[in-house]
Amino acid sequence: MKSQENTRELAQQAFKNHLEYLSAGRIAEWVDLFTEDGVLEFPYGPKGFPESVKGKQELFEYMKNFPEHFKVEFENLHFHATEDPALVIAEFTSKGHAISTGKPYNQKYISVVHNTIDGKITKYVDFWNPLVALEAIEAPLETFIKESVA
């Protein structure tokens, strides 16, 4: 049986991996951080943006174009203490730009992430400001999901 501290370490490491894989454009590895039926939710997504994506295939389809649209580094990671060792609450920022426009993409995030005791993400609630992305790419956010910048 895993200790609470071990569970917490695995959950926080999965979150750190999430940031590393996204900033490096390693989307297949990013998807593998989730359980088969893992969910990514967007409580503040704008009109036309999905409220959530579920399962590895949907997660991949949703995120596959991220490296073509944004070049970012994630910084200022701070984990908040939780009673549940499999729950990660994190604040962090991104520093980067939209590739198509060169405009800055500097975002502030709060993430609430539920994990298994083995560190697989079951539910990721992503609190971010969609206006920052809209201003950076100068296009509807559906473009991010449906199109690549070929």
Image (tube, grey):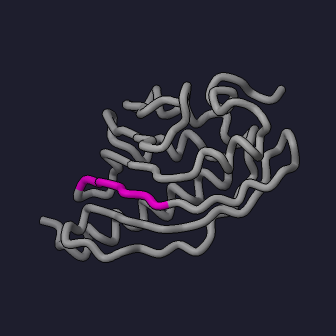
Main secondary structure found in the magenta portion? strand
In the visual, does 9 lie left or right of 44?
A: left
Q: Is residue 90 magenta?
A: no
Quarter in which the N terminus is drawn: bottom left
The quadrant where residue 90 appears: bottom left
Q: Which residues are magenta?
A: 110-116
Residue at image location 36% in from the left, 38% down from the top = 39
Residue 24 is situated, as x and y percent measured from the top left of the image, at: 67, 53
In the visual, does 20 lie left or right of 33?
A: right
Residue at image location 83% in from the left, 26% down from the top = 150
Vertical side of 42 occupied by 91: above or below: below
Residue at image location 79% in from the left, 55% down from the top = 104
Residue 132 is situated, as x and y percent measured from the top left of the image, at: 68, 50
Residue 98 is situated, as x and y percent measured from the top left of the image, at: 79, 46
Residue 117 is situated, as x and y percent measured from the top left of the image, at: 23, 58
The quadrant where residue 118 appears: bottom left
Q: Is residue 115 magenta?
A: yes
Vertical side of 53 occupied by 95: above or below: below
